[in-house]
Image: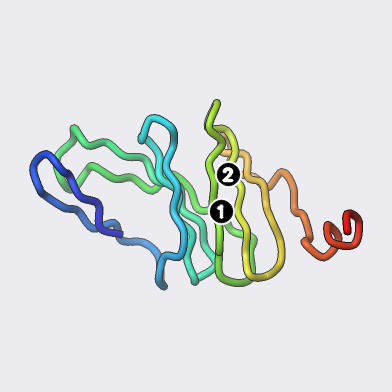
Amino acid sequence: IRIYNLESLDSDILLGHESIIICIDRSYYGKWLVTGSKDSNVFLWDIYMEKPRNERYKLLAECIGHTEAISAVALSRKRNQIILTGSQDRTIKCWDITNISMLYNICLILLLLLFF
C-alpha cells in the first residue's frame, strides 16, 4: 500500500502482505487501517502520522481464519470494535478488535438457503 500525504506530497509504503491487496477500509477518524489481501490475511494497522517516517505505521493484529482471498473488509463506524471480512472461501467473519478473536463465522451457502 502506498499512503500519500497531500500536504507535503510525500508518500510511505506499507509492507506486510505476501500478495496483492484487494480491499481496504479506514476508521472514522483515520487512526486505523484494515487491509485484505489475496494471501487470505487481514491486517489491522495503527497510523501515527505525527511520528518519524519509520514509526508511522504499526501492525496491531492479523485476523487469521479465511482459506482464500479476502474480497471485502469493513470497520464498524461507531466504536471501532469489530471488523467484518468477506472471502472467496464463501464465508463472512466478524472479528472482535479488542482481542482479535472471531465472533461469528457465517457461511454464505447457509444464508442463501435460509433467506432465499
Q: Nearer the viewer, residue 92 or 60?
A: 92
Q: Residue 69 location in percent, x, y?
A: 56, 70
Quadrant showing the N terminus = bottom left
Q: Secondary structure at mark 1?
A: strand
Colouring chosen for the image of the structure:
rainbow
Give the left or right position of residue 49, taking residue 10 as reference. right
Q: Amino acid at mark 1?
A: Cys
Asked if residue 20 is positioned above or below residue 12 in the image, the reply reads below
Q: Nearer the viewer, residue 28 or 13?
A: 28
Quadrant showing the C terminus = bottom right
Residue furthest out toward the right: 114
Q: Which residue is mark 1?
A: 63
Residue furthest out toward the left: 8
Mark sitting earlier along the chain (1/2): 1
Asked if residue 79 is positioned above or below residue 27 in the image, the reply reads above
Report the residue at 40% width, 45% height from top: 33
Q: Secondary structure at mark 2?
A: strand
Q: Which residue is mark 2?
A: 83
Q: Categorize mark 1 by other alpha carbons within 10 Å: few (<14), some (14-19), many (20+).
A: many
Report the residue at 31% width, 61% height from top: 15
Give the left or right position of residue 44, taking residue 106 as reference. left
Report the residue at 83% width, 57% height from top: 111
Q: Amino acid at mark 2?
A: Ile
Is the Cβ of the residue at disc 1 closer than 8 Å to that at disc 2? yes
Q: Residue 64 location in percent, x, y?
A: 59, 58
Q: Quadrant of residue 21?
A: bottom left
Distance CA(mark 1)–CA(mark 2): 9 Å
Q: Quadrant of residue 110?
A: bottom right
Q: Residue 100 location in percent, x, y?
A: 58, 43
Q: Nearer the viewer, mark 1 or mark 2?
A: 2
Report the residue at 71% width, 43% height from top: 103
